[in-house]
Amino acid sequence: MLKELHGDNKTLVESLRAAHVIVSKANDYATTSLIEIWIDEAERRAWFLSRPRGKESSPNGSGSGNRANMRKGASYAGPFPQYVPTSPIATASLAA
């Protein structure tokens, strides 16, 4: 299933690139910008779907990326840093 999704996203990227050429020749800047965003998102999905998962992802087959193999007390923060507001308005609204 992941291979099929990966292939679908690669096909979507190819189609979006063809559409990008057409709208950029027409000087449609808004649509061009939207398509660029969609291309970036589809490429990220395709990359993510191409990464190995589970026990196959580690050389010794232990599945070192699995939550069960994390040391006790550790937590997974995800691929993106947590948002920390720094402006006085944002911190005041969080305190309320």
Image: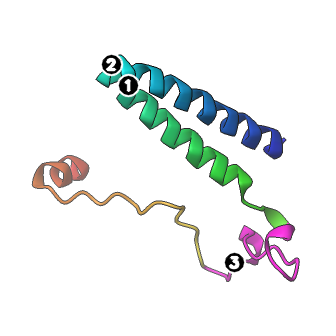
Q: Amino acid at mark 1?
A: Ser
Taking the spot 43% from the left edge, 35% from the top edge, the residue there is 36
Side (left or right) of 19 relative to 12: left
Q: Say left or right for 45 vs 52.
A: left
Disc 2: which residue: 28
Query: CB of mark 1 within 8 Å of CB of mark 3?
Result: no
**In terms of secondary structure, what is the magenta stretch mainly?**
loop
State the image coordinates of residue 22 (x, y, percent, origin top left). Answer: 46, 20
Q: Nearer the viewer, mark 1 or mark 3?
A: 1
Q: Where is residue 10 drawn, in percent x and y?
A: 68, 39
Quarter holding residue 28: top left
Give yes or no for contact between labels 1 and 2 (Cβ–Cβ under 8 Å): yes
| Gap between marks 1 and 3 measured at Cα | 48 Å
Q: Residues within 10 Å of mark 2 (few under 14, many from 20)?
A: few
In the rendered image, which residue does mark 1 sit on?
Answer: 24
Residue 45 falls inside the magenta stretch: no
Position of residue 96 measured from the top left corner of the image (x, y, whole percent): 21, 47
Q: Could you tell me which secondary element the residue under label 2 belongs to?
A: loop
> Which residue is label 3 attached to?
70
Which residue type carries mark 3? Met
**Amino acid of disc 2:** Asp
* Residue appearing at x 61%, y 27% in the figure: 15
Instruction: Tell me, for residue 84, which label it has, or none.
Output: none
Residue 85 locus on image (x, y percent): 24, 57
Is residue 70 toward the left or the right of residue 36 in the image? right
Q: Nearer the viewer, residue 46 or 28?
A: 28
Residues under labels 2 and 3: Cα distance? 49 Å
Point out the stretch of residues depicted in magenta. 55-73
Q: At x 69% / y 78%, what residue is drawn?
A: 70
